[in-house]
Image (cartoon, grey):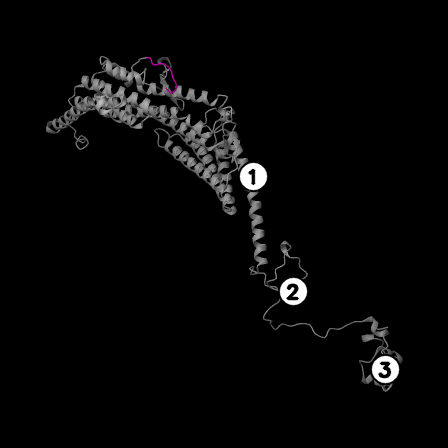
Amino acid sequence: MKSTHSVDTAPKGITGSTRRHIISRLHKAATYANELVKLLGDRETTGASETDILEARAYCACLSGAMKFEKQNWEDSLKFYSEARVIYDTLTSSTKKDTFRDLLSTAIDPSIRYSAYQRQLPRTVAIPTIARRYFPHSDSELVTAIEKLDPDALSEKPSQKKGSAAAPDSVPKTITWRSRTVALEDASIALALAAVSTASGNLSTFLSSPRSPELMPKEKAAAYDDVLTASQDAVDATKRAIDELIAEGVDQGDKRMQGLQVTKTAVNYALVGWRIGRNRVLSGEHDGASMRTVVARKPKKSGKSGKPHAEKEGKGGKLSKLRERVALYDATLQSLDSVKELPGVAADEPFLKELQGKRLYFQALKCLAIARSHDVLGNRKEALALFDRAFSLSGQSQALASPTSATQPLLPGLDIQPAEVEYLRQLLQAEVFRFRALVELDNTDESSSKKLNGQDPKNKTPLLEKLSEFPTGGITSLNNLVTYPPVLEPVPVKPLFFDVAWNYINYPRTATQPVEKPEAVDSNPAGSAEDGAKHGGKKGWFGFGR
């Protein structure tokens, strides 16, 4: 009903019968929720747990707060919403359910902030502080149930633990983005950024521990969950602050709005950096450029796990691993594209150039992974084309890369070191050279195979006419021995034999054979050279005989 009348431009919002109908519906819902809490209180009958009762209390408080909110009773609305927020926050930390987190960010926190604004509370007071201040501490049973799940839920100075918010003295006052520094006027954003700092410190400690080299990539990536959650909280807090200023009618040129836009770009870019860092850890060594696969050994008898070792995978395992890496590269490229939509990025040409260089780097890694999958399948020509494409992209990335520190950062993020780009470029260059040779060998073998099977259209000469040629590959094809059916073709006949021994041969004559007369020489020009010599004629054929 509220969304239907959202276009209502009346100064007091929804009025008349519609507003009374909404309040009536919320009052009835709150009454039913209160009855549910009473029924669940009888644990022997219902078998409800402590968590079930707390969730019902939070649901009832949320509906009661919504009813008071519509009645514009800001004091009571703060009390009910504060009770719901503390309970849902406690359940979120104990059950790890995203449903409660979404409910806090979309319904409860904006209502608390608006009610606090109507109560003229300063914006610098964080929403968790307001919730603890207006929480019904007099309800000892509720307080006991909450502190049983989280002892620090109602404490103004919670003890430090992994993933918890930072201490008040470490809360940042300003935030910097591309040489521009703005003040953090919203306390919820400052607390969220402090939580990010604490979570990143815990992550750095975890990855620098002595057992870090023995961890699997998935174990390292799981350590990013806390810092990603804290970064997402900072993004949500910034979005709520901007929405509140827009609802109040603050102009975009206002100093507060400009500061929040800078903060929005900074916290979103940081969140993208943590996501990409997690993807890089999951990809493996050198952002997935190395094909070495590491698995943990089985636990020893002493209970200690062995050191990781390289695993020899089959074709299916390699293809599955490469498919996962391509999916990670796609997610990374999508995250980089989302940065361009942030406020102030489109007008920053040096920053866009830097982003393009990083995008080309991950595009080269994606082409490398796809090329290796073609290599596994035996498609060497396709692999060569993709390797060459990846090599070209790595060269462009190296040309657009911004100068960074020579030391490798402990926490992988969006900072790509020149050494990583150079390693990828050298690897791709070696793969291009290798696959050019392999493709050339494949082409030679294919040509030889066609000739061997008689499939070469240029190879129509029968074997009889090329006996003096050495066969390619050392194997002779017996499929084309002679030309059949035979064709009519000219051949040389009646050759001339120049035999020097002809002049020295005397053939025996029979007794009945008459001796040739001298004058017979003229009538028989094909006579022997001996007869010509006796009569003084020319010796041999054409006068060259002896």
In this view, the residue in front, 193 or 201, is: 201
Q: Where residue 376 appears, x then y in whole percent?
A: 50, 43
Magenta residues (range):
157-163
Residue 513 at x, y percent in the picture: 85, 86
Q: Give the image location of residue 5, x and y in percent.
A: 16, 31
Give the mark nearer the N terminus: 2 vs 1: 1
Determine if the magenta segment contains residue 158.
yes
- Give the spatial CA distance, label 2 vs label 1: 45 Å
Answer with left or right where residue 78 lies relative to residue 233. Answer: left
Q: Secondary structure at mark 3?
A: loop
Residue lying farthest left? Answer: 17
Quadrant where the image shows the C terminus: bottom right
Q: Residue at x 21, y 21 (%)?
A: 42
| Label 2 vs 3, first from the N-terminus | 2
Q: Looking at the picture, which amino acid does disc 2 mark?
A: Glu
Predominant SS along the magenta part: loop
Asked if one can make out residue 122 in the rendered structure from this viewpoint, the answer is no
Q: Could you tell me which residue is drawn at 55 percent across and 44 percent down? A: 435
Write down the residue under mark 3: 509
Q: What residue is shown with label 2?
A: 465
Amino acid type of disc 1? Ala
With 402 as the anchor, is 271 left or right in this view?
A: left
Residue 299, position as x, y percentages in the image: 49, 27
Q: Is 305 contained in the magenta span?
A: no
Marking on residue 430: 1
| Residue 454 seen in this snapshot | yes
Amino acid type of the residue tagged 3 in the rendering: Arg
Q: CA distance from mark 1 to mark 3?
A: 85 Å
Secondary structure of the residue carrying numbered label 2:
helix
